[in-house]
Image: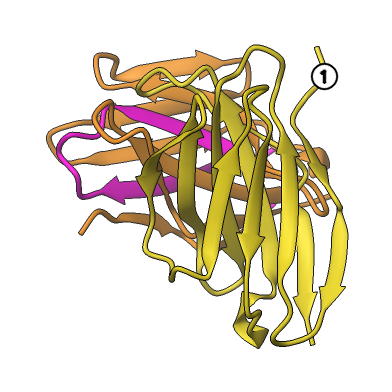
Amino acid sequence: GENVEQHPSTLSVQEGDSAVIKCTYSDSASNYFPWYKQELGKGPQLIIDIRSNVGEKKDQRIAVTLNKTAKHFSLHITETQPEDSAVYFCAAGSSGTYKYIFGTGTRLKVLA
Amino acid sequence: KAGVTQTPRYLIKTRGQQVTLSCSPISGHRSVSWYQQTPGQGLQFLFEYFSETQRNKGNFPGRFSGRQFSNSRSEMNVSTLELGDSALYLCASSFGRPGETQYFGPGTRLLVL
């Protein structure tokens, strides 16, 4: 069935270092890949997304890359700050099903 | 523009009871999706409604049901609650077009005793 694998499950980095979270999807029909950040006690908030016709997208310190052939997509956070500490979820969606499959989440800790 | 709102934010029920959760989408959004979030399973898709019709459904038992009203507000009902239904229930709204960004509410935390 449809599946999104996300690694690592936890990630600790020093403030100022970079963080990379990777996801792999199984459904070849997937064409939309959002990333969400969830802080304690809040719902997930969209931070960046990418569509299958684009290989990379950047927004300030955050970037996402997509390799359609390998069915991989990754989130890159540079110059990490303590406020980046949260749980990050990747997701894959396709135009045919109107639903999204989420990864299991990565708990990012940025150490000051 | 107001975000997605969910009520109540917290709920405690006992096994066997039923519960109804409410979600008000962002103004203009016609699609509402529901997810169950647990520490072990992550975000699991329950169902999606668009213009009062269920368009998609996840792999949950029939105890989980939902509906959507003409103003796009949605409710989710869980009957005969089980301990394992304890979770954070999230709803997300969008305009409903394929492959479109969903915006999440803060969730309703349900504890079943």
Task: Looking at the picture, tell me which residue is in the foreground, A35 or B109.
Answer: B109
Name the residue tied to disc 1: B2
| Chain for disc number 1 | B
Quarter of image, res B74: top right
Q: Is residue A42 visible?
A: yes
Q: Colour of chain A?
A: orange
Q: Colour of chain B?
A: yellow
- Picture layout, residue B15 above or below residue B10: below
Position of residue B87 relative to residue B48, above or below, is below
Give whichever of A100, A91 is nearer the camera: A100
Residue A52: image location, x then y, percent: 26, 21
Name the residue located 36 percent from the left edge and 39 percent from the top edge.
Answer: A92
Task: From the viewer's perspective, tell me whether residue B43 is left or right of residue B98.
Answer: right
Main SS of the magenta part reads: strand
- The vertical placement of A37 against A10, above or below, is above
Tell me residue B110's x, y (percent): 77, 68
Q: In the visual, does B61 lie left or right of B93?
A: left
Instruction: Give the side of residue A71 with respect to residue A98, left or right.
Output: left
The outermost residue toward the front is: B70
Kindly identify the residue that appears in the image at 85 percent across and 66 percent down.
B11
**Residue plotted at (47% across, 31% down):** A34
Boundaries of the magenta span? A12-36
